[in-house]
Amino acid sequence: QVQLVESGGGLVQPGGSLRLSCAASGITFSRYAMSWYRQAPGKERELIATITTAGGSTNYADSVKGRFTISRNDAKNTVNLQMDSLKPEDTAVYYCNARMTAWGRLLDYWGQGTQVAVSS
């Protein structure tokens, strides 16, 4: 079955860095656009970064642009999110998402999430 497993979350001080990873199995990883979302308490889930197949292009939410970097390794079936200059407002559960359209169907998979807390 499809599994997306996030890791790398934790507690960090403002201005610090974290690197999240998402390991995928059960899918042809290279065919999927990969994204990171986050959801803070009491807020809706927010798309923060996307990388297309073969790393052709990346897109970021304005709230993280210039601080976060998404990358993928198709040989290892992983997608990473390097988060620098972290702020308290980055505190959220971060989710990995794999998405593609095939045979007229949307194939959409989610990880279980990893908690990131930014606090002094």
Image (tube, helix red, strand yellow):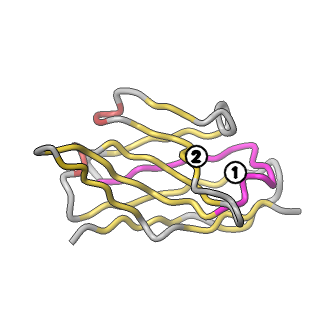
- The residue drawn where x is 34% and y is 45% is 73
Secondary element under disc 1, as helix, strand or loop, is loop
Q: Amino acid at mark 2?
A: Gln
Q: Which residue in the rendered view is the most extreme toward the top?
A: 56
Residue 113 sits above or below residue 60 on the image: below
Judging depth in this view, the residue of 12 and 50 nearest the camera is 50
Which residue is disc 1 drawn over? 17
Left or right: where does residue 112 sit relative to residue 91? left
Left or right: where does residue 32 sit relative to residue 118? left
Location of residue 89 in the rendering, given as x and y in whole percent from the top left corner: 78, 52
The C terminus lies in quadrant: bottom right
User: On residue 117, which mark appears?
Assistant: none
Location of residue 117 in the rendering, given as x and y in whole percent from the top left corner: 73, 64
The N terminus lies in quadrant: bottom left
- The residue drawn where x is 84% and y is 62% is 119
Mark count: 2
Q: Magenta segment range?
A: 77-92
Residue 66 sits above or below residue 44 on the image: above
Residue 93 figure quarter: bottom right
Residue 41 sits above or below residue 63 on the image: below
Task: State how far apart marks 1 and 2 are (Cα).
Answer: 7 Å
Residue 91 on the magenta segment:
yes
Mark 1 touching mark 2, by CB under 8 A?
yes
Which residue is disc 2 drawn over? 82
